[in-house]
Image (cartoon, rainbow, N blue to C red):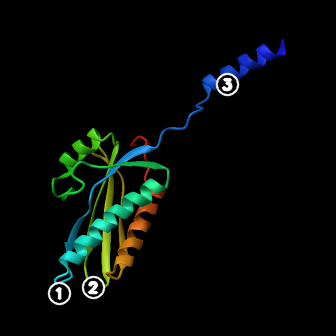
Amino acid sequence: MLVPSVAILLGAVLVASPVWPDPSMVVAVANFDFLDTSGEIKNQKDTHDRRLTALSDYLRQQLSGSGKLEIVDLPCQSAQCTATDPGFEKLSEQAKQAGARFLIIGIVKKTSTLIGWIEYSVLGVDDQRAICGELVSYRDDTDESWRRAARFSASQILKRCAFGVPAQ
């Protein structure tokens, strides 16, 4: 009979083949730190705090919207929640508790009125090893320039970071 033979062959192929794709990688994104070394006289703390919150939120949105990563919230997310405070170890513990395998940390550095940098690292929460990181520059100090920098950083994280690939 041809039908049982085909069914047995198909069953053997299905058992031997990875039919289901890996579930999306679960990642936590900490709020980013901020360092202003521009020496500007005008106090822009409130503006930069607002932009920093928007940058972290937009980065999470971009990564989540890709469909490649599942972004989970950290319990401290509505507070400081950065690599500096409460620190990587506590963030890593919180990320594990939230089910994340990776944690993204970073800092925005404003070096002048027109030049800023975003430095990020993607770290495994189990071994605390970086799987990737980058230093991205951006121009201008506006809401839109920070948003573009967050969008570009998200695209780089998705393109360059080997989520789920064992470290060599």
How many angstroms separate mark 1 from mark 2 (CA)? Answer: 11 Å
**Dot 2 surroundings within 10 Å: few (below 14), some, or many (20 or more)?**
some
- Say which mark, if any, is on residue 94: none
Between label 1 and label 3, give the one nearer the viewer. 1
Q: Position of residue 11 (x, y in %)?
A: 67, 20
Asked if the residues shown at circle 2 and circle 3 are in contact, with their CB atoms under 8 angstroms apart, the answer is: no
Q: Is residue 11 above or below residue 73?
A: above
Q: Nearer the viewer, mark 1 or mark 2?
A: 1
| 54 lies left or right of 42 | right
Report the side of 71 relative to 106 (left or right). right
Q: Which residue is mark 2?
A: 113
Mark closer to the chain start, 2 or 3: 3
* Disc 3 secondary structure class: helix
Can you say which quadrant of the picture contains the C terminus?
top left
Quadrant position of residue 132:
bottom left
Q: Give the residue type at disc 1.
A: Lys
C-alpha distance separating marks 2 and 3: 61 Å
Q: Earlier in the sequence, mark 1 or mark 3?
A: 3
Residue shown at 61% from the left, 23% from the top? 15
Residue that badge 1 annotates? 42
Please count the marks in the image.
Answer: 3
CA neighbours of label 3 inside 10 A, class few (<14), some (14 to 19), many (20+)? few
Where does label 3 land, which residue? 13
Distance from Cα at disc 1 to Cα at disc 3:
68 Å
Task: In the displayed orientation, state which residue is furthest to the top.
Answer: 1
Q: Residue 101 placed where, x, y %? A: 35, 42
